Image: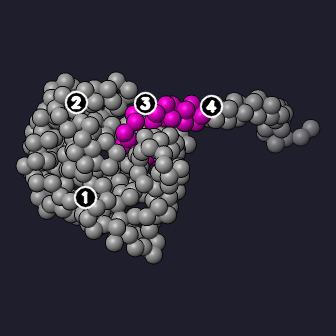
Amino acid sequence: MDPARVRPLVLGILNATPDSFSDGGRHLGLDDALAHARRMVAAGADVVDVGGESTRPGAQRVDADAELARVLPVVRELAAEGIVVSVDTMRAATAEACLAAGARMVNDVSGGLADPRMAAIVAASDADYVAMHWRGHSDTMATRATYADVVGEVRAELRARVDALVAAGVDPARIVLDPGLGFAKDQAHDWQLLGSLDRLTDLGHRVLVGASRKRFLGRLLPEDAPVEARDVPTAVVSALSARAGAWAVRVHDVAATRAALAVEGAWSHGRADAERAAAERAASDAPHAPHAGPAAVAGLSE
């Protein structure tokens, strides 16, 4: 690893929803949502990712007006405070309103497939755009978790989305890719994608990893473990994702992930320092070549 690399950004998840799988209803009111966002920023979140529609497995779509009513006031208030805000939405109209209110990123789990206007809205802005791998809405995605080669197919489908977005005018430098863990994926698919993250980073775009509290992590724990117990494996995944070159991680527990990233960063720097010191010792211990006199340099003999 490059010891000079910057740690991944941490996106703190703010679900302004009644039905998200781990924290639905906790931050539905404006005051509660703002307070939670501020706590995440204090804990080290670089970006607050605000969503108003649950995309948990089996979830039904939310009315567009209801989604906008949940997220727009939160985005507006946080942006006014100078907090970097992302809006988690598949709808172009929601993205457009939130960008106008100060959001600096659109996190679209459909990668532009759910709303054909999304690419144009993003192209007209200077916002970053997260395009996730997606095969359909939450109510049907479990039936689409069929792959012969999950890493190769996800990579190819993400590349196709990039090509379509760029053709629609989106600046390729603004595109961030997300493998879509848990979306039309089973547990084995998720682990294969994480273990092959370099196959996605080599597409030439930044990569965001969103593993936080997901079902495949819960299966590592006792069956009766609360969903918050998944924060420890989430933090470990964050650290390993950093090592694999992820640009950002999206998490519920910001403090745990920041601590894990600090450990991974110190570990990487320690290894780099040790390797540098060993190289310097080897160079200083190397025998010096004998000095060649003038006659030898000239190729003359006496």
What count of labels does the image hold? Answer: 4
In the image, what residue type sits under mark 3? Ala
Q: Residues within 10 Å of mark 3 (few under 14, many from 20)?
A: many
Q: Residues within 10 Å of mark 2 (few under 14, many from 20)?
A: some
In the image, what residue type sits under mark 2? Asp
Q: Are marks 3 and 4 in contact (CB under 8 Å)?
A: no
Q: Residues within 10 Å of mark 1 (few under 14, many from 20)?
A: some
Q: Residue at x 21, y 63 (%)?
A: 113
Q: Residue at x 64, y 35 (%)?
A: 271
Sequence-earlier tag: 1 or 3:
1
Please state if 291 lies on the left or on the right of 121 as rendered.
right
The quadrant of the picture occupied by the C terminus is top right
> In whole angstroms, how far apart are the C-alphas of marks 2 and 3?
19 Å
- The local secondary structure at tag 1 comes to loop
Of residues 28 and 186, which is closer to you in this image? Answer: 28
In the image, what residue type sits under mark 1? Ala
* Residue 42 shown in magenta: no
> In whole angstroms, how far apart are the C-alphas of marks 4 and 2?
41 Å
From the image, tell me which residue sits under label 2.
32
User: Which dot, 2 or 3, sits closer to the camera?
Assistant: 2
Q: Which residues are magenta?
A: 244-269
From the image, tell me which residue sits under label 4.
270
Can residue 128 be spotted in the picture?
Answer: no
Q: Main secondary structure of the magenta part?
A: helix
**Residue 91's quadrant in the figure?**
bottom left
* Mark number displayed over residue 59: 1
